[in-house]
Image (cartoon, rainbow, N blue to C red):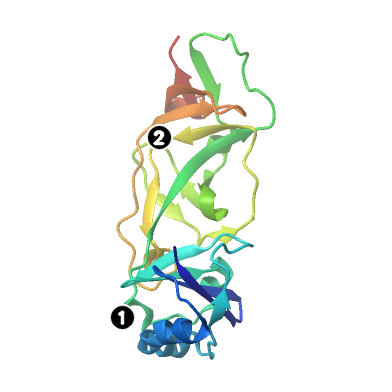
Amino acid sequence: MSLCFEAAAEGGTLRLALPCGAGDAVAAALALAEHEALIVALEGWLQQPLDPRPAPAAGAGEPLLWARSGVLRLGFPWALLAAAPPALAAPMLPVEWPELSFEIDVAGFDTAPRPADAGAGVLLLPPAFEPAWRVLLHAGTLALVAEAEWRGPGEELALFGPPQTGLAQRAAWRVQLDARLQRSLPELLGWVAPAAPPRPDGAARLVGPDGAARAGNIAPALGGAGLWMAA
């Protein structure tokens, strides 16, 4: 059971959750008062006052990105984080920021790109024939999407900017890399220098609307690239 509070802010509502319940409003206020220094630090970072008020344990609305400060959990709407100041002080806040994991879609198709009973062969990937191969990254639980450039197996995967919410729907059929992009929140938002860009290999799979996948390997094909699949 948890004790929850909400604080309205520009960009969304911040949620705070303590791991214990409280019998009444006075007990709730005393429990939250133990974390006053953190709330003051958050106000200084966000440059706006916060007035946490008791809230239901089961929050509704958009997905939240959860961070931790000791026993206190902090739920941030992505819009609040994205609109926050550059936050040079944010890495020094007593907050453990999470690491996000993104699936990488390198091509998408609205209809089945090959027959269900097709054997071994190659599926050409149209984006690979463009001067810059743009790929989409998805963090499903947060409904976040990012765009990146990739020039094929062994090449750097370079993000164009921070992730955004609700910019694109995933194609019914997609070619998805086996590798994922792992980045901490401070790296994604530019608060700290990012790690070296990953260099995914060609291991990938064709994923259908039902989640069934056909494994393969991305390799050069006809001046672009294709997913080569065995029988």
Residue 208: x, y in percent?
Answer: 59, 27
The vertical placement of 180 against 81, above or below, is above
Instruction: Give the left or right position of residue 4, taking residue 196 as reference.
Output: right
Classify 10 Å Cα crowding around label 1: few (below 14), some (14-19), many (20 and above): few
The mark tally for this picture is 2
* Residue 51 picture quarter: bottom right
Q: Is residue 4 left or right of residue 11?
A: left
Q: Classify mark 2: helix, strand or loop.
A: loop
Where residue 8 appears, x then y in whole percent? 60, 81
The relative height of residue 15 versus residue 151 in the rendered view (above or below) is below
What's the distance in space between the residues labelled 2 and 1, CA to CA? 34 Å
Give the percent coordinates (x, y) of residue 36: 39, 89
Identity of the residue drawn at 55% across and 25% down: 124
The amino acid sitting under disc 1 is Met
Residue 51's disc number: none
Mark 2 vs 1, N-terminal side: 1
Residue occupied by mark 1:
92
Query: Could you say whether the residue bearing mark 1 is in a helix, strand or loop?
Result: helix
Image x and y of residue 27, in percent:
45, 83
Q: Quadrant of the N terminus?
A: bottom left
What residue is at 52 percent from the left and 40 percent from the top?
105
Alpha-carbon neighbours of circle 2 within 10 Å: few (<14), some, or many (≥20)?
some
Identify the amino acid type marked 2: Asp
Indicate which label's residue lies in the foreground, 2 or 1: 1
**Residue occupying the far right of the picture:** 111
Q: Nearer the viewer, residue 172 or 71?
A: 71
- Residue at x-position 55% and y-position 30%: 125
Q: Nearer the viewer, residue 181 or 148?
A: 181
Asked if residue 146 shows in the view, the reply is no
Residue 227 higher or lower than 185, as above or below: above
Q: Which mark is residue 178?
A: 2
